[in-house]
Amino acid sequence: MKWGVRHMSVYKHIYRAYDGKVTPVWTRVFVLARYGFEEAWSSKITIGLFTICFLPFVFFLIGIYLANNPLARALTGFRGPQVLTINAEYFLTLIEVQSWFALPLASWIAPRLISFDLSDNALPILLSHPISRFGYVLGKFIALFTSLSFVTWVPCLLLFTYQSYSSPLPWFAANFQIAVGLLIGELIWIAFLSILGLAISSWVKWRVMATGAIFAATYVPAGVGGIVTAVLRTKWGYLLNIPFMMTTLWHRLVGVPESIRGDHSLPTAAIAATLVMACLICAAMLNARIRAREVVRG
Amino acid sequence: MGIIDLNGLEVRLGGRIVLDGLTGSLQGHAIGLLGPNGAGKSTLINTMLGFHPPSKGTASVFGLDSQRDKAQVRSGIGYMPENDSYIGNMSGVRFVRYMAELAGLPAGEALERAHEALFYVGLGEVRYRRVNTYSLGMKQLIKLAQALAQGPKLLILDEPTNGLDPMARQRMIQLIKEIREQGSARLLISSHLLRDIDETCDEALILKDGRIAALCNIEEERRSNRSFMELETVGATEKFSVSIRGLGCECACFPGGRIKLVIPDNVEVRDLYVIASEQGVQIRRMNRRRDSLEDIFLRAMDNEMGRAAHVSL
């Protein structure tokens, strides 16, 4: 039994130092991630949003099943493969739907990860442990990124795997780029969403307000970008339009031709640079906020 | 090597010098950190925790540089901040366990120690309640519990009795004394309450305007043979004072027959009464007191130069 001299005692009420095993410093990030994850999923609203996020998954799963099962298609009245063709466009629709369903989930979870620590001034205690500001943000990021993974690239790849399994072998080989595009496209999106969510949550005191602010940060610049595009007659205003940029990126990654005019198409490098810039701004916002709150002033 | 070694430590915040060339070695079991508001107490603590990089000099804890070996230094420190600092929507035991895991305890050990620490500080019965439902005193205690749970080598307590009622304060002081006597953790206690430091510490570092105003061993001061006395007399006060000087006392006379004197070890109070009787002097009032931390503190504050000094009386 572990009761040794190094232990205190509940019933004796005495203090003893701890001289047992200590975990490696690098693993402390995962302690933060685990507690953040538990915090995020302790809310019934999180469970509700998560469930809603799986409705499209189920819908698309049924679609793949019907597309690959002539008997089921006949029974349900679908008329031939042209109605349900499982191709890059099918998965593009999937990635778009899952990605936009992930936005409310991120907007709900991100403030829960940061706001509780800030509102109760927990940072001085948290960061007095062997964990850096970067480690703290990374821990929270992992919690949010993992939560969003469950509703984005994981179901997308599961459906791709199911389609590959249901179809004759050449389908997988011919469409492997779709899987890569799904994975990369969703990873970029949820990484961006995670850092944006954490940055905004760190600056907005009330959780509900923070949730609204994350939506606003996604869509308000899009409106501004639209105005810039219309007034200045330039395509570069789209660089403020996150939904447009991501949709363009997903098209290219999955391999579906874009539907907009060629002169309005943004270079991939410009999209990547804008996303990196946005992430750096978010990181700077987080750093400034946490640095200001990590010590007790006075 | 002391517990805390300061070597010309200078810290600038916003271009202003907050700590100015602190040099000293703190070796006591319980070190009191004293000073008026803005003296740099919290900055010194934050520097030791690695939050503020020194602009000059170094601060070492257990021989480890507070900046270079930040993670190792923090691993050995349990920190109880001055202000409210907790995660309100967590239960007490979950919060303490979380902090213990961050300090490096495996999950199982952390849970075990969290329960023990909460019982130790007297929060055992409320450990499953959310922290934001705790009273102010309970919040102070849970901050102490989270600092203790990891079993630190150095326990830094910033204003531990802040906002506590007399009973809770006494309980906190008692806990600190017990931890000190147990001896496995060194203590650094920052407080503006001299009484708290006087009761719990054996060494005091007094800061003023970011400089060391005094660094003294309270125990040694207590053991010193200085004994102060105030007398209120009626009669030939001058002649009386000359006579008691003859006994080896240092004394000063004030209007109204008041005399302040320091009596050496070999002089008894009875001797004063004998002389007074011989000279027909009436001793109306006699206050005897030992030199207190308050005197040390006030002298340090009066030191206009603000230079570091090992206080001698």
Image (cartoon, helix red, strand yellow):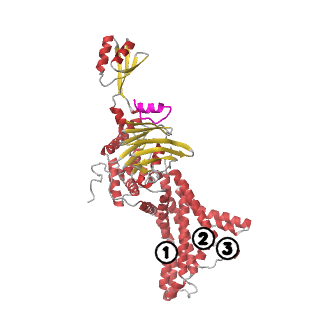
Q: Give the mark nearest the N terminus, 2 or 1.
A: 1
Q: Nearer the viewer, residue B279 or B80?
A: B279
Quadrant in which residue A256 is drawn: bottom right
Q: Residue furthest right?
A: A232
Q: Is residue A263 magenta?
A: no
Which residue in the structure is indicated by mark 1?
Answer: A155
Real-space Cα separation, disc 3 to disc 1, in angstroms: 29 Å
In the image, A210: left or right of B196?
right
Q: Observer-nearest residue: B62 or A232?
A: B62
Nearer-N-terminus badge (3/2):
2
Would residue A61 be seen by someone viewing this image from the given angle? no
Left or right: where does residue A269 sit relative to residue B184? right
Which residue corresponds to mark 2?
Answer: A246
Which residue type carries mark 2? Met
Q: Can you give x and y, in whole percent of width and height, for residue A59 in the image?
A: 51, 77
Disc 3 element: loop
The kind of residue tagged 1 is Pro
Question: Which of these two is toward me, B254 or A160?
Answer: B254
Which residue is pictured at 49% across the width and 74% down the height?
A155
Residue at left offset 72%, top offset 68%:
A234
Task: Tell me the magenta residue range.
Answer: B294-313
Q: Position of residue B21 (x, y in %)?
A: 49, 42
Give the residue at x 30% y 45%: B182
Inspect the image, locate mark 3, and give the three-letter code of the amino acid beneath it: Ser
Residue A74 in percent (x, y) is at 51, 88
Tell which subunit mark 3 falls on.
A
| Residue that label 3 marks | A265
| Label 1 CA crowd tier, 10 Å (few <14, some 14–19, many 20+) | many
